[in-house]
Amino acid sequence: AQSVAQPEDQVNVAEGNPLTVKCTYSVSGNPYLFWYVQYPNRGLQFLLKYITGDNLVKGSYGFEAEFNKSQTSFHLKKPSALVSDSALYFCAVRDRQSSASKIIFGSGTRLSIRP
Amino acid sequence: EPEVTQTPSHQVTQMGQEVILRCVPISNHLYFYWYRQILGQKVEFLVSFYNNEISEKSEIFDDQFSVERPDGSNFTLKIRSTKLEDSAMYFCASVSRGIDTEAFFGQGTRLTVV
């Protein structure tokens, strides 16, 4: 079965410092991986995706993610955190075994950036 | 920029009542989904819909739930007899084509069953 795991419920970072939100995956075949962000009382907003090609993918709001096949990881990163980055972040994978390729989400990581 | 819209934003209903949550997916998209999220926690898959029929459903999606695309634009989720544990945020999503494309989510409907 396809799955993603986010080992940290919460990540706390000082503004201006680099941030990393961790994600590992378990899939059969090539993974199609995504990061979404959820601000309070809002829907899920697409940040970036890895389908194929370069292991480092860039997305919205200065975020990037590194695909590492040997470690089965897809960590989200940003060189310099902003207070406005505080939100709930979800790693996700498309289920290739699903007839409609549903998205399977991780449990989410709450990112808190302190001024 | 095209977006998925959901109505209402908040619905309060009494236990045992029927509710219909409405969604307008992005117009040229082909795959449609409903997810739910309880208290800002994990986002759970409910059902997927393609080519005017359910393509997959989770164990959560029991006989009390149904989906329809009645007019080619709206996509609805009906809960026939709501239970307290149905209280959650319900998100609609749509995807344009294949597995390599991202899903676009609506802002959600907060359902409160009292």
Image (cartoon, grey):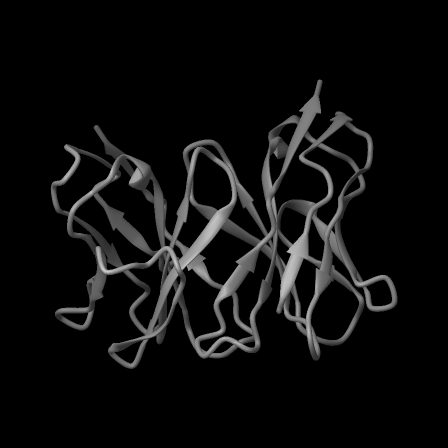
Name the residue rendered at 26%, 77% in the picture.
B53
Towards the viewer: A7 or A13: A7
Q: Is residue B13 above or below residue B48?
A: above
Q: Residue at x 73, y 43 (%)?
A: A7
Tally of numbered discs? 0
Q: Position of residue A55 (x, y in %)?
A: 80, 67
In the picture, the quarter occupied by the C terminus of chain B is top left
* Position in image of residue B65 (x %, y %): 24, 57
Provide residue A114's location: percent of width, then percent of height: 71, 20
Judge from the rendering whether residue A17 lies leftward or rightward of residue B43; answer left or right: right
Position above or below: B10 against A37: above
> Toward the viewer: A23 or A50?
A23
Residue A67 rendering spot, x and y as whole percentages: 78, 63
Judge left or right: residue A22 versus residue B81.
right
Locate residue B89: give its quadrant: top left
**Which quadrant holds the N terminus of chain B?**
bottom left
Give the side of residue A62 with respect to residue B10, left or right: right
- A11 is higher (above) or lower (below) than B66: above
